[in-house]
Image (cartoon, coloured by chain):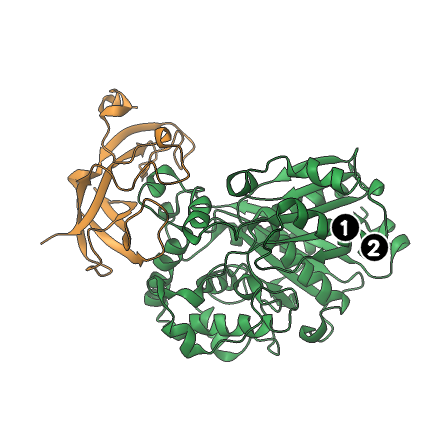
Chain colours: A green, B orange
Amino acid sequence: MDRVAIVGASMTAFGDREGEWLRDLLAEAGAACLDDVGIDADAIDHLYVSNMASGELEGQTGAPNMLAHDLAAQPAYTARIDQTSSSGGAGIYAAWQSVASEASEMTLLVGGEKMTHKTTGEATDVIASLTHPVEYKHGVTLPSFAGLTARLYLEEYDAPRESLGKVAVKNHKNGVDNPKAQFRKEVDLETVLDSPIVADPLRLYDFCPITDGSAALLFCPESVARELTDEYVVVSGVAGATDTHVVHERADPTTMRGVVESSDQAYAMADRTPADVDFAELHDMFTILEFLQFEDLGFAEKGEGWKAIESGRTERDGDLPINTSGGLKSKGHPLGASGVAQAVEVYEQLLGDAGDRQLDDPEVGLACNVGGFGNCVTTTILETPEAE
Amino acid sequence: MTDQNDDTASDESELTAYRYSDGSITYPGHPRGPDGKDPVGTVDLTEYTAEVVTWTTSTATPPGVRQPNHLAIVEFDVDGRPVRALGQLEDGNVAIGDTVEPVYVDELRDPEAGIREPASQSWDGFRFRPVE
């Protein structure tokens, strides 16, 4: 079977894009992605938009058709992919399926969200609306799930509170070298640990910001990619999985079964193991999530993930760099765009286009995109065409 | 379902768990249990105490939610079967492992202030407080 390739990628600047709305952001990223490859929109067979809540946040629905018209991509088939915060990863899975099944020979995926016009409370409530009624009525938020889980993790595994703070320090440091990141400013550990409490024991700098932004990827069969360009990557593994909707029903809240299951399937599809992965983009919506995913992806034993930040393993010069883009923590988290933007970073690293944050000739990169509090997850493995 | 919940759902407590044929119990109940089959009965968790699994105090709360909002995941022991629930705490003076009991509250948050349609769900329920 012809492998599925990604031949183009783009992302807008993430942050407070005042005066620009979802329509503007999607069109900016989509057009830039087509320009990256140098093809016209009429080559697109399928167009997917990853988005969680444009209706709730902006009163704008029908985004895929809107984008198709703005890019002059009609009569392309369009669909909206909503899987909450993992809409981007789910979009990658859908785009891969469309090409692998030969339903489409050219699929454009654009993820985007407009959020900063809402107050923190309003945006938090829109995101928390994914919860079960017995959770929602208690005022639970995604940050409060993080606080509950962080307290349990620190206690169960005797991990120091400072280790979570070091994740924020690392990802802010990486974000300095990402011109598209929302925050391009280093923070020190003392600042992180002295910041206001948001969900005890987690503090302000343990959380990602509210963000506007969009990111895009262009998928086609590898045989078509070779005709278009010398610079492309292949999707060697992609899979998605779910965990319980009701978070407290999990026997171990520090294990994300969706991460375990989706990565097991993605590794099998790619014929890879965790040891083959050169770097990864993880869904650090909260610092604790970087530890949980690091373990559940098989990079460390259960309860040992925090030791990776202490030893420097996950730094940019470590043996397994995590979130070279700055992660959601520093780059920002425009819900539907985040999973797509993770893959944009992996794509740029594999092609040697990551600028000042470029790693030393990586061949295999992984992206893990998490929806809810691990409720639904997509894991994607990208490789250079000649990766061994 | 057994005769324990042949009555209408409105007679169920807001802390009613469902029991399934494999012996598992979940809160909330689901149309199919972990065994993939229909529930066979109910358990009123208000008759039990529970142990705090973990807790947090949330200071950044959405519209209509008290600030700060103390929350916990607690675990009931129903005849040797663990059943977990998430709920508000009366206050933040708890520790992991503390024993707590449910206390009824007729409105846990303002139904009119959030994004969810008020008529789509109930808003009363139980907070937890340490057993003296």
Residue B98 location, quadrant? bottom left
Q: Tell me the number on the disc at residue A37.
A: 2
**From this viewpoint, is residue A101 visible?**
no
Mark 1–mark 2 contact, CB under 8 Å? no
Amino acid type at circle 1 is: Ala
Q: Residue at x 64, y 48 (%)?
A: A111
| Chain identity of mark 2 | A
Left or right position of B31 against A37:
left
Q: Nearer the viewer, mark 1 or mark 2?
A: 1
Furthest residue in direction front, as rendered? A19
Residue B72 percent coordinates (x, y)? 28, 52
Indicate the amino acid at tag 2. Answer: Val
- Is disc 1 surrounded by few (<14), some (14 to 19) or many (20+) residues within 10 Å? some
Residue A184: where, in percent of width, then height? 58, 71
The vertical placement of A7 against A304, above or below, is: above
Residue that extends furthest to the right in the rendered view of this protein = A227
| Marks 1 and 2, how far apart at CA | 10 Å
| A322 relative position to A287: left or right | right
Among the two numbered marks 1 and 2 on one chain, the one whose residue lies closer to the N terminus: 1
Q: Nearer the viewer, residue A3 or A339?
A: A339
Mark 2 crowd level (few <14, some 14–19, many ≥20, 10 Å Cα):
some
Residue in the foreground of this view, choosing between A61 and A256 = A61
Q: Residue at x 38, y 27 (%)?
A: B38
The residue singled out by tag 1 in the image is A31
Q: Relative to residue A228, is residue A207 drawn left or right?
A: left
Badge 1 marks a residue whose secondary structure is helix
Residue A162 in the image: x percent, y percent? Answer: 40, 75
For label 2, the SS is helix
Residue in the image at 38% along x and 62% along y = A150
Q: Is residue B17 above or below residue A317?
A: above
Report the quarter where the C terminus of chain A lies.
Answer: bottom right
Who's the residue at 22% across and 25% down the image? Answer: B11
